[in-house]
Image (cartoon, helix red, strand yellow):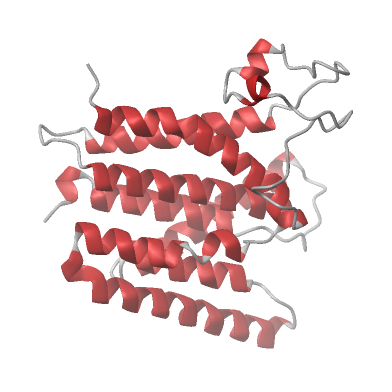
Amino acid sequence: MMDTTRLLPLLAAPFMGSFAGVLITRLPLHRPVMLGRSACETCGMTLAPHELLPLLSYGMQAGRCRNCRAPIGFFHTAIELGALVVAVTVIAMQGQTDLPPDATRIWAGCILGWTLLALGWIDLRTLRLPDALTLPLVPGGLLACQLVEPAALVDHALAAMLGYVAFRLIAGVYRAIRGHDGLGQGDAKLLAAAGAWIGTAQLPLLVAGAAIVTLLATGAVRLARPHTPAAARIPFGPGLGLVLWGLYLLDSAPWGLS
């Protein structure tokens, strides 16, 4: 039987994915996150509680609004499934030894993954990384470090400062040479958050890995859509978030413990 340390994050994941979907749709538009009621995007009818059940409501309604019968997009269900994949991955990484599962590491990995999922999706849609999600990751990473490895707290705080300053300098040099922005302030803030989670030693690997992932994604887009303008901006946040989460999971896995 699965213990509660593993079961609770799995149960919470679809609900966190549903909340992430709200953040993705409302934050870029500066709409209230907590106060606004969910409604059909076609007819505007407010959704009933049973229509807000993560992963279940879409199937129960056969993918259509009960009022106007308009098709419901798969977006929210995809986010909920993504959040569940995050939880399953974190738990699997923590369960590779005979050691008892570490609840702090499991929840930290899930919260980081869920937040980065929302940030990456928003960046893909809008080329922006909202401060409302990025900035809390800095104290969140430092708190996780304090709870798990307090001796490394100073290093992680230093990494947060170095990450932000380094990206701002790179962005300034790029703008001076090319005459336009290549990296946004959101990327610098996300790298600061990354430093808080993984420390100074991992920062170079993070930047290199994120650059490779972004270049590969850019190449795939060019192949799939050959008419994409060469000057089209490619978001750096999704690659940065994916590699950050991977590095954190590897570092916090039982075999990575010192």
Q: Does residue 208 lie above or below 17 as drawn?
A: below
Q: Is residue 32 left or right of residue 86?
A: right
In this view of the protein, which residue sits in the foreground, 253 or 105? 105
Residue located 13% across and 35% down the image? 100
Query: x, y (%) of residue 229?
Result: 81, 56
Side of 114 where 57 appears, left or right = right
Between 46 and 116, the residue placed more toward the observer is 46
Query: Which residue does the image show at 26% across and 33% down from the upper left?
Result: 5
Determine the residue positioned at 78% across, 33% down: 39
Where residue 103 appears, as percent x and y from the top left, is: 24, 42
* Image location of residue 26, percent across then percent down: 72, 49
Q: Position of residue 214 (x, y in %)?
A: 56, 55
Residue at coordinates 84% horizontally, 28% vertically from top-left? 45
Q: Quadrant of residue 1?
A: top left
Q: What is the residue that sits farthest to the bottom in this orientation?
A: 176
Q: Is residue 121 depicted above or below 68 in this figure?
A: below
225 to 233, vertically: above or below: above
